[in-house]
Image (cartoon, grey):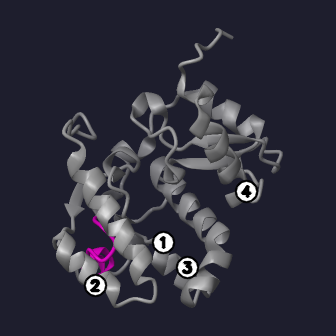
């Protein structure tokens, strides 16, 4: 194996902290679950490879992995089946309070697959902030499993919706169509203020707009 230069992101300070956080979040259980999976996770895998534009340290792009599954993904390098798969993927992005879930509810059809963190949490019994925190590992495991199935083109759904509040979502998730729900920072803040996590969400709203519009180098997510 070629020796990696110390300026490589894997050697920088954030990675060791982020890596540990992902392993703890996923309870040291491999999220890939390949044919030769050992179950116990000792590594962290990038769902969207860095070479394809995946973010190095974004938790949404990371999952715990056993060494066998992670090495198999690295060695395989196979094309991602979702590109030519039967499922039309719509990525719905926006800040907290942006109305993303409402948009999907108003536009989805029966049989559509919806990947929405809040809806998954509610389906698993999450009621209120404290319960949501307790269920976070299970919610993320379910969400990541759905995203992986979408990427493999295995869901069988005619259309799928991915809801994300990540300002760099286009680089993290597969999509054929994108919808940006941006009601304005003022409106998003006002909506969040009505929730029981108003102050926390207000900070997230500000952070979303700062990151979203300070990125002067807007990049196309796909080549087509």
The magenta stretch spans which residues? 94-105
Residue at the (46%, 55%) spot, across then down = 150
User: Disc 1 vs disc 4: Cβ atoms closer than 8 Å?
Assistant: no
Label 3 sits on residue: 121
Q: Return the disc, 4 or 2, that comes first in the chain's sequence.
A: 4
Residue tagged by mark 1?
Answer: 117
- Disc 2 marks which residue? 191
User: In the image, 191: left or right of 174?
Assistant: left
At x 29%, y 74%, the residue is 100
Q: Quadrant of residue 208?
A: bottom left
Q: Which mark is residue 24?
A: 4
Q: CA distance from mark 3 to mark 1?
A: 6 Å
Disc 1 to disc 4, how far (Cα)? 19 Å
Q: Is residue 70 above or below residue 33?
A: above
Q: Position of residue 118 (x, y in %)?
A: 47, 78
Q: Give me the residue at 28% from left, 65% from top.
A: 94
Mark-to-mark CA distance, 4 and 3? 19 Å
Q: Is residue 132 left or right of residue 105?
A: right
Of badges 3 and 2, the one in the foreground is 2
Asked if the residues shown at circle 3 and circle 1 are in contact, with their CB atoms under 8 angstroms apart, the answer is yes
Q: Quadrant of the C terminus?
A: top left
If you read the primary sequence from the N terminus, does the residue marked by circle 1 or circle 2 appear first? 1
């Amino acid at each position: 194996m070629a020796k990696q230069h110390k300026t490589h992101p894997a050697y920088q300070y954030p990675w060791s902290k982020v890596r540990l956080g992902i392993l703890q979040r996923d309870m040291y259980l491999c999220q890939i679950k390949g044919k030769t999976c050992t179950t116990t996770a000792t590594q962290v895998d990038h769902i969207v490879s860095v070479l394809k534009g995946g973010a190095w340290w974004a938790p949404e792009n990371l999952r715990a992995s056993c060494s066998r599954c992670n090495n198999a993904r690295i060695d395989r390098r196979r094309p991602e089946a979702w590109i030519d798969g039967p499922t039309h993927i719509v990525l719905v992005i926006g800040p907290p309070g942006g109305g993303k879930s409402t948009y999907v509810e108003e536009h989805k059809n029966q049989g559509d697959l919806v990947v929405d963190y809040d809806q998954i949490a509610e389906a698993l019994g999450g009621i209120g902030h404290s319960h949501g925190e307790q269920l976070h590992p299970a919610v993320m495991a379910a969400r990541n499993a759905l995203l992986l199935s979408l990427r493999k083109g295995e869901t069988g759904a005619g259309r799928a919706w991915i809801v994300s509040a990540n300002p760099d979502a286009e680089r993290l998730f597969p999509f054929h169509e994108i919808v940006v729900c941006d009601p304005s920072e003022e409106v998003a803040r006002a909506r969040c203020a009505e929730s029981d996590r108003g102050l926390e969400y207000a900070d997230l709203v500000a952070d979303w707009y700062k990151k979203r519009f300070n990125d002067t180098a807007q990049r196309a997510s796909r080549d087509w």
